[in-house]
Amino acid sequence: MSKPMRYSWRLATLAPFIALAGCVSLGGAEPPDSLLTLTSEARAAAGDAYSGTRAETLAVHVPETTAAIDVLRIPVQVDDATIAYVTDAVWVEKPARLFRRVVAETIRVETGQLVIDGDDPSLFADSHLRGTLREFGYDARSASVIVRFDAIRTGDDGMVETRRFEAMEQGISANAIPIGSALNRASNDVARQIAAWLKAPAEDAES
């Protein structure tokens, strides 16, 4: 995969859409005052324990991403052919890894299933959740954040299932903190949708 291209945009270029300056490479720049992260709204309490066989364990993998998302910045869709980045918005690490942690923790709490989300989860599980994070950023045309994830679930029986999940928040101001907070809420929304999807077959089997 080729490295994402970084563009420098003049404010005048974006003025018809939003009062937002573009981004350039961080190399040699002053470090930001703060870093953004994602936090799961569903949290296992200290001392909570989960157990299960390899066949009962789910491995949650870091999703694939587009080149525009595979950076430490928040992409802004200016129009159909133009992407910029939010000024002063920097993730503590790449969004795909942050998103994976939110999804894994939400599944763990919402389903009670043993979930592995380390660097090599395949060693401990026969069921896997993979996918592609297709949208994770800000749309200047609608002043909204969008999180869109195409999930791929493979079971220990060889069955493969796919589903698209999406969450959107509109009316978000074009600043780093509001956008980061909205992306956190949207990520948790998508994570809950995924957990409900994974939980449904188990509930059907018990009925």
Image (tube, rainbow, N blue to C red):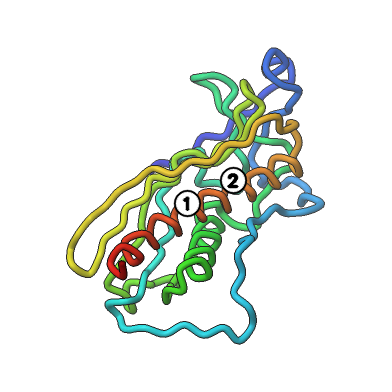
Q: Secondary structure at mark 1?
A: helix
Q: Earlier in the sequence, mark 2 or mark 1?
A: 2
Estimate how packed mark 1 is, as few (under 14), some (14 to 19) or many (20 or more) residues with alpha carbons within 10 Å.
Answer: some
Residue at position x 73%, y 36% in the image: 87
| Pointer 2 with pointer 1, Cβ within 8 A | no
Estimate how packed mark 2 is, as few (under 14), some (14 to 19) or many (20 or more) residues with alpha carbons within 10 Å.
Answer: many
**Relative to 35, 139 lies left or right:** left
The span from disc 2 to disc 1 (Cα, nearest Å) is 11 Å
Estimate the x, y position of residue 68 in percent, counting from the top left. 50, 38
Task: Work out whether 35 lies above or below 81.
Answer: below
Residue at position x 51%, y 55% in the image: 192
Estimate the x, y position of residue 135 in percent, counting from the top left. 49, 38
Task: Work out whether 12 lies above or below 109.
Answer: above
Task: Determine which of the numbered discs, if any, sits on residue 46 in the image.
Answer: none
Estimate the x, y position of residue 21 in percent, counting from the top left. 73, 28
Task: Determine which of the numbered discs, if any, sits on residue 186 in the image.
Answer: 2
Residue at position x 45%, y 68% in the image: 111
User: Residue 200 versus residue 80: which sits nearer the camera?
Assistant: 200
User: Residue 163 versus residue 130: which sits nearer the camera?
Assistant: 163
What's the amino acid at mark 1? Gln
The image quadrant that residue 41 belongs to is bottom right
What's the amino acid at mark 2? Ala
Question: For the N terminus, which image quadrant?
Answer: top left
Please state which of the two labelled residues, at mark 2 or mark 1, is closer to the viewer.
Answer: 1
The image quadrant that residue 130 belongs to is bottom left
Residue at position x 62%, y 43% in the image: 73
Most distant residue in the front direction: 207
User: Residue 83 versus residue 150: which sits nearer the camera?
Assistant: 150
Q: Which residue is mark 1?
A: 193
Question: For the C terminus, which image quadrant?
Answer: bottom left
Task: Work out whether 81 lies above or below 45.
Answer: above
Most distant residue in the left direction: 158
